[in-house]
Image (cartoon, helix red, strand yellow):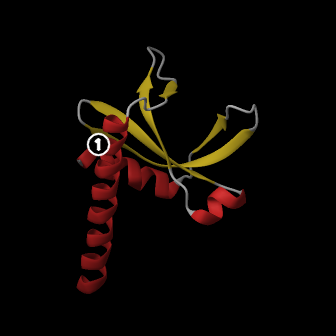
Amino acid sequence: MDQNKNINNEMEQEEVTVTLTLDDGSQLECVVLTIFDAGEREYIALLPMEGELAEEGEVYLYRYSEDAEGNPNLENIESDEEYDLVADAFDELLDDQEYDELVGEDEE
């Protein structure tokens, strides 16, 4: 979990983006929200920067890995069971972050 907090702190300082190529060939620019562990894998949460999906707050979840050179690799989540595991882990991460923000505000 400390790794998640470090990534979040780095991303707050510098906005990291990814361009997704969708099934229809269109491209979608997304902000990387976080990279997190769920089960035995790493996953990435992406938020579209423009358009209707951005306005709706639609978050995309993908499997995340890096190749030998450190280049990111995103893969689709194939099963409903895996998606449920990842979505639950992401929701828990958001809940923890919201709690930390609330506690931080109370202490000031």
Q: Could you tell me which secondary element the residue under label 1 belongs to? A: helix
Q: Is residue 22 left or right of residue 44?
A: right
The residue at 69%/60% (across/down) is 52
Is 86 situated above or below 92? above
Q: Nearer the viewer, residue 18 or 75?
A: 75
Q: Quadrant of residue 35?
A: top left
Is 47 situated above or below 63? below
User: Which residue does the numbered mark 1 point to in the structure image?
Assistant: 85
Q: Badge 1: how crowded within 10 Å, few (<14), some, or many (20+)?
A: few
Is 7 situated above or below 24? below
Q: Position of residue 29 (x, y in %)?
A: 67, 45
Q: Position of residue 33 (x, y in %)?
A: 47, 51
Given the image, on which type of amino acid does mark 1 rest? Leu
The residue at 35%/48% (across/down) is 87
Q: Quadrant of residue 17?
A: top right
Quadrant location of the C terminus? bottom left
